Amino acid sequence: MIAQADDPLPSAARIVAVCFLSVFIIFGIRLSFSVFFAEFVLVEGWSNEAAAAIFSLNMLVFAGTAPLAGIALDRWGPRPVFGLGVCLMALGLGLSSRATSLADLLLSYGLIEGIGLGITGLGPVASVVAGWTTPSQRGRVLGIAFAGTGLGSLLFVPLANLLIENFGWHDAYLALSLVCLIVLLPLMTLGLRKPPEALSQRIHGRRARLNWRGLLRSPVFWALMLAAVMTMGPVRSLTVHQIAYMESAGVERTAAANVVGLAGLLTSGFFVGLGWVSDRFGRATAYAIGTAGLFGAVGMLVVMRAFDAPLILLLYALFFAMGEGARSSQTTALASDVFQRQGLGLINGLVGGLGGLGAALGPWLVGRLRDESGSYDGGLLVVVAMVAMSLITYVFVARSRT
């Protein structure tokens, strides 16, 4: 089971529970952007590329912040680091509620909220969970913690849609800012801590020793970084554009938001289930199952334009959940397995940062292709290519471990 410290409070199980609740809020807020995106494009009249640029800048800033947050976590622990991150998230969302232009949102949501999200992202959170967990249990424990991302979208995507419909997107952002201050800040600052030194020694052996020269000369390290980019790029491309795509295919927005919420619920189950598969049958097996799911999700989007059937929407939710449930958790689990002696905060911060880079470039490129061609066909091909590349690089890293 999960490793326990001699001092049972806080126990490893408690740390995982707090991380679950934290990512439930953080990524519920993050994934609700697809509803705001549809509002920006269809009501405000902004182009797909311009609206996607808000999210892309947010992810670029995330990419640059996450590795620094990982290094800070290795040195100072989660309480001060995550406390700063949550405050910046709340500030960025609060300023977004006062935005009157695209430039305002680029500053508030893209830059300020992006820094906060980079500090509190899945990579830094994964380093905390991995620090309390043995490698043989790491896949399922990270799956449990990351299951909060799926449940978060189940609540926050329909909630954001409801708030926007009744109060407008400005007040919706204000409500999300208050959630960060009232709920998330005390949760992460009071509920998390570094594992005791004795526990770290029992789980991971000798203390981490950073070796930049060895890392930069390792083809396995560079393959892992490329896998991180390609892991989150296609997922976030679908996340940002899926509601707008469904509306363009004739699906009513509330129904589309409910489909996204259902996908979030199913994602939670896949995080846990594929985590078990990962520990039992290998990281690459679980990741390959998720890859098949993303291919299926793209297929359902293509079919959706030709056939108006609820079953297609349900299958999209199922396939997307299968893909999402194997991406971030299995990438951080593999990174923690292979490079834990370099520092869990550092390596997972780098993985999270490069994942953020992919999450920035993917949605922007899909939006650009949509504006230029008037179709999502080119963007979907980009998604398929990124999914295929992610599998190739992930399997390479996984095989190097054996």
Image (cartoon, rainbow, N blue to C red):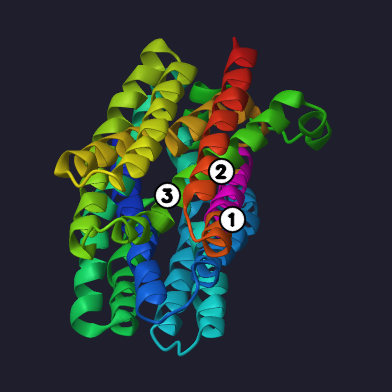
- Image location (x, y in percent) of residue 366: 53, 54
Q: Does the magenta-highlighted stretch encompass residue 360?
A: yes
User: Residue 382 shows which numbered tag?
Assistant: 2
Instruction: Name the residue rendered at 26%, 44% in the picture.
Output: 263
Residue sticking out furthest to the front: 306
> Which numbered disc, 3 or 2, marks the residue that appears first in the sequence?
3
> Which numbered disc, 2 or 1, marks the residue that appears first in the sequence?
1
User: Residue 149 shows which numbered tag?
Assistant: none
> Which numbered disc, 3 or 1, marks the residue that appears first in the sequence?
3
Label 3 or label 2, whichever lies nearer to me, is 2
Amino acid type of the residue tagged 1 in the rendering? Leu
In this rendered view, identify the residue nearer to me: 70 or 225.
225
Vertical arrangement, residue 327 with respect to residue 358, above or below: above
Q: Secondary structure at mark 1?
A: helix
Evaluate if marks 2 and 1 touch, with contact meaning CB atoms under 8 Å apart.
yes
Residue placed under numbered mark 3 in the picture: 238
Q: Residues within 10 Å of mark 1 (few under 14, many from 20)?
A: many
Q: Secondary structure at mark 3?
A: helix
Amino acid type of the residue tagged 3 in the rendering? Leu
User: Residue 365 shows which numbered tag?
Assistant: 1
- Image location (x, y in percent) of residue 239: 40, 52
Quadrant assignment, res 318 = top left
Amino acid type of the residue tagged 2 in the rendering? Val
Spatial separation of the CA atoms under disc 2 and disc 1: 8 Å
Vertical arrangement, residue 274 with respect to residue 321, above or below: above
On the picture, is 130 further left or further right than 220?
A: left
Instruction: Name the residue rendered at 58%, 66% in the picture.
Output: 57
